[in-house]
Image (cartoon, helix red, strand yellow):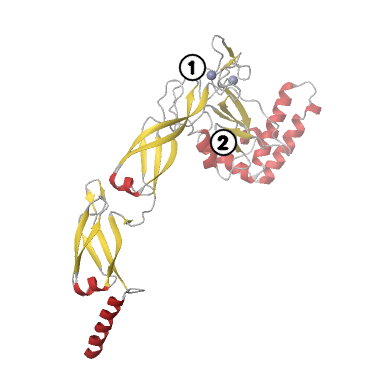
Amino acid sequence: MSTQTKDFYKILGVSEKADQDEIRKAYRRLAKKHHPDANQGDDKAAERFKEIGEAYAVLSKPERRKQYDQMRKYGAFGMGGGARSGPRRPSSGPGAGAGGFGTDSQSFSFDDLGGLGDIFSSIFDRGRRPGEGARREGSARKGQDIELSAEISFDLSVRGGRLNLKVPVTEACATCGGNGARPGTRLDRCQECGGKGVVSFGQGGFAVNRPCPACAGRGRIPGDPCPSCRGSGSVRQTRTLQVKVPAGVESGDRLRISGQGERGDNGGPPGDIILTFQVKSHHFFRREGLDVHVTVPINMAQAALGSKIRVRTVHGKHVVLKVPPGTQSGTRFRIRGQGVTKGNRTGDQFVEVKVEIPSSMSDEERTAFEAFAETAALKH
Ligand SMILES: [Zn+2]
Ligand SMILES: [Zn+2]
């Protein structure tokens, strides 16, 4: 990727600190001097006139000038020295800067950019990050990562286990082996980029190379496209992958599955899958960190006289919990070591008892309650 920047200050013959008035005066003077009408048949003057227009289009707009200044500061000068300059668009008039820099996935417009950070991340960083960046013919490139989320049951999240994951991926077309040509036919040189795989765009005084849209950066184009993939060389498919869910995962936990993402280019390694878990809620268990909370109903006699109750744990076992006499509704008991295990840590299970007041009762129960009521009344 090459970036080429002209020195607009030098072109206008002004200093970097020149104010808008100086810039306007310099432009008017130079434009008059190099105007094509005054220099009939002088190609150099025409070229110079164009440059002056470009320089003025950038330096006369404070916002664009600021971006340009930052670009100079960050050393865009001299990068790709001697590189071809891309086709230029007219750089004055209402259309100036309205075009965009294209990249694989985004399109930037010079005027739309909020800050230079965006330009830099798009121009200079692309290609460094795995799975991103403009394709250069022949250079190995890591495949894209695939982000997926999977909704799993509470039980699976606690105990771990296997999960069948459906992964949408772009696979090399089996019919043509990924080159996009009908089997038995040849690839032709791409006309658009002359086989280079990149095209360059000029914008506001610097040129940016991007993958050729016609051949997707390959530099070659099938003369007779493969019928299965229509010449693209790839097909969308769903791959089923068995994933080992580690015990103790929570909603939002992410798992990176190496080498199962999109395939790389030119022998580059495949990307990864980044899987985010969403755990369904459970009708009985409620999880807080590694601790598990449950609410167990007991009747008034169990609360008043004490009893032993059996409580289920997340590990599929039952533990016996002793409820002492006189237990109030809402009392919480802790069962140590029966929470969720994650790595080498294990939480506890908390059991809140809820004393249920009967909403209807049998004759015997009613008699018993009446006897209780009489005794209780005597005490007060
Ligand atoms: Zn094909
Ligand atoms: Zn091309």
Relative to 376, does residue 235 appear above or below in the rendering?
Answer: above
Q: x, y percentage for residue 366?
A: 30, 79
Q: Hey, what amino acid is under mark 2?
A: Gln
Q: Hey, what amino acid is under mark 1?
A: Gly
Rate crowding at label 1 as few (under 14), some (14 to 19) or many (20 or more) other CA atoms within 10 Å: some
Instruction: Classify mark 1 as within 8 Å of ligand 1 or not, answering yes or no.
Output: yes
| Residue 251 horizontal side relative to residue 88, left or right | left
| Residue 375 horizontal side relative to residue 28, left or right | left
SS assignment at label 2: loop
Front residue of this view, candidates 297 and 263: 297
Which label belongs to residue 103? none
Q: Mark 1 and 2 residues: CB-CB less than 8 Å, in contact?
A: no
| Residue 4 horizontal side relative to residue 271, left or right | right
Q: Quadrant of residue 216?
A: top right
| Residue 350 horizontal side relative to residue 185, left or right | left
Front residue of this view, candidates 306 and 47: 306
Using the rendered image of the protein, determine whether residue 261 is visible from the camera's viewpoint: no
Point out the image quarter for the C terminus: bottom left
Q: Quadrant of residue 47?
A: top right
Q: x, y percentage for residue 76?
A: 53, 33
Relative to 195, does residue 243 appear above or below in the rendering?
Answer: below
SS assignment at label 1: loop
Rate crowding at label 2 as few (under 14), some (14 to 19) or many (20 or more) other CA atoms within 10 Å: few
Using the rendered image of the protein, determine whether residue 265 is visible from the camera's viewpoint: yes
Front residue of this view, candidates 15 and 72: 72
Q: Earlier in the sequence, mark 1 or mark 2?
A: 2
Pointer 2: what residue?
106
Front residue of this view, candidates 44 and 302: 302
Q: x, y percentage for residue 240?
A: 41, 32
Cα–Cα gap, marks 1 and 2: 28 Å
Q: x, y percentage for residue 99?
A: 66, 35
Pointer 1: what residue?
177
